[in-house]
Image (cartoon, rainbow, N blue to C red):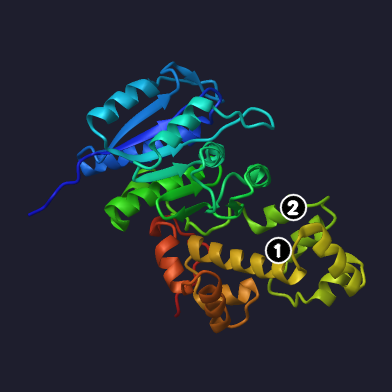
Amino acid sequence: MNSVHPPRRVVFLAYAGMNLLDLSGPMQVLATTNRLQGREVYRLHVVSAQGETILTSAGLPVGTQSLQEMDRLLEAAPDLHTLVSPGGSSGDQFPLDAALVAWIRQHAEAAVRICSVCTGAFHLAEAGVLDGLRVTTHWDWAQELQRRYPALQVDADPIYIRQGRIWTSAGVTAGIDLALALVEQDLGHASAIATARQLVMFIKRPGGQSQFSTPLATQSTGAGRFAELHAWIAAHLADDLRVENLAHQAGMSPRTFARLYVAETGRTPARTVELMRLEAARRALEETRLPLKRIASQAGYGEEQNLRRVFLRQLGVSPGQYRERFAAAPAALSMAQAEPAAG
């Protein structure tokens, strides 16, 4: 006998100036899942303090229900499943909505799942929901979140983090990744992939993947002293990239180079090379049909076995498993990059 789970009530908290995509991205994932399943898997609500039409940061108005109206619904049917706090701000300050914070405090214990997208983590943190947890937010706001709420363990790298029933995600489009992960938790991997395919999302990013690429991350730190070196490294991953050779390329002695590099970027030169090689290998697995031997050579690992060891150590999966899970749809893979057929 097949039992159908009743609709999961999902409440999105809205306020003036919020990011439109922080709201619409996750909502569309859940709405698309409803359509594909042919039933109301998720019952969606957009709620603001007064139930007014709020103006998003993109200038698009969004109609909402009031907190009082939602309270009446929950009194009649106490079935709050997922609470989502989207982000968004104007300028360099995140304006907290006191009414939303109080509502989160009131209903946090009853919610099956609590989630934030981007700077929506600030509302959850202010409500005390995130105390003692490892969380993430938009990379540009991570330091401020940590400074304002020292009880948190803020990690600016992942796309999303799950800590029990609490989920936090990175900025903007990461809310879509988060919503797909929620669908996978509720309905399984096949349903999440079906939704992703319907949304023309060929690659389902893993939760541990970086918010942005290693070359971009290195360029966004410090004063850019090593920007040209980073570009050179990315173009010469198969070369001998020991510190001595990098120092020569930068026109410094190895000791001076190593000291200045760590001071400016916060990581050793070897760590940057490691991250760039891993990213190059990941992208090749996601976007091409090149054999592992060729990918290992091009990314600077030399032998396929070295590539396998790095993937198992860094990502917990083999290169083959990574490709199977995260590669683009076959028709989208680069034919030009494919290995020519033998004979």
| The N terminus sits in image quarter | bottom left
* Count of numbered circles on the image: 2
Mark 2 and mark 1: Cα distance apart in space: 12 Å
Within 10 Å of the Cα at label 2, are there few (<14), some (14-19), or many (20+) other Cα atoms? some
Q: Amino acid at mark 2?
A: Gln
Q: Which residue is drawn at the image coordinates 60% and 65% (left, top)?
A: 280
Q: Which residue is drawn at the image coordinates 52% and 62% (left, top)?
A: 336
Q: Nearer the viewer, mark 2 or mark 1?
A: 2
SS state under label 1: helix
Q: What's the mark number on residue 234?
A: 1
Q: Are marks 2 and 1 in contact (CB under 8 Å)?
A: no
Q: What's the mark number on residue 219?
A: 2
Q: Is residue 8 visible?
A: yes
186 vs 25, left or right, is left
Q: Is residue 218 above or below residue 37?
A: below
The foreground one among 208 and 14 is: 14
Q: Is residue 24 visible?
A: no
218 vs 84, left or right, is right
Q: Amino acid at mark 1?
A: Ala
Q: Earlier in the sequence, mark 2 or mark 1?
A: 2
User: Where is residue 185 drawn, in percent x and y?
Assistant: 33, 54
User: Where is residue 284 drawn, in percent x and y?
Assistant: 54, 65
Q: Is residue 132 above or below residue 316?
A: above
For residue 49, what is the image quadrant? top left
Within 10 Å of the Cα at label 1, are there few (<14), some (14-19), or many (20+) other Cα atoms? some
SS state under label 2: helix
User: Where is residue 87 drawn, in percent x and y?
Assistant: 53, 35
Q: Which residue is drawn at the image coordinates 27% and 29% (left, top)?
A: 75
Q: Which residue is drawn at the image coordinates 57% and 68% (left, top)?
A: 281
| The C terminus sits in image quarter | bottom left
The foreground one among 187 and 148 is: 148
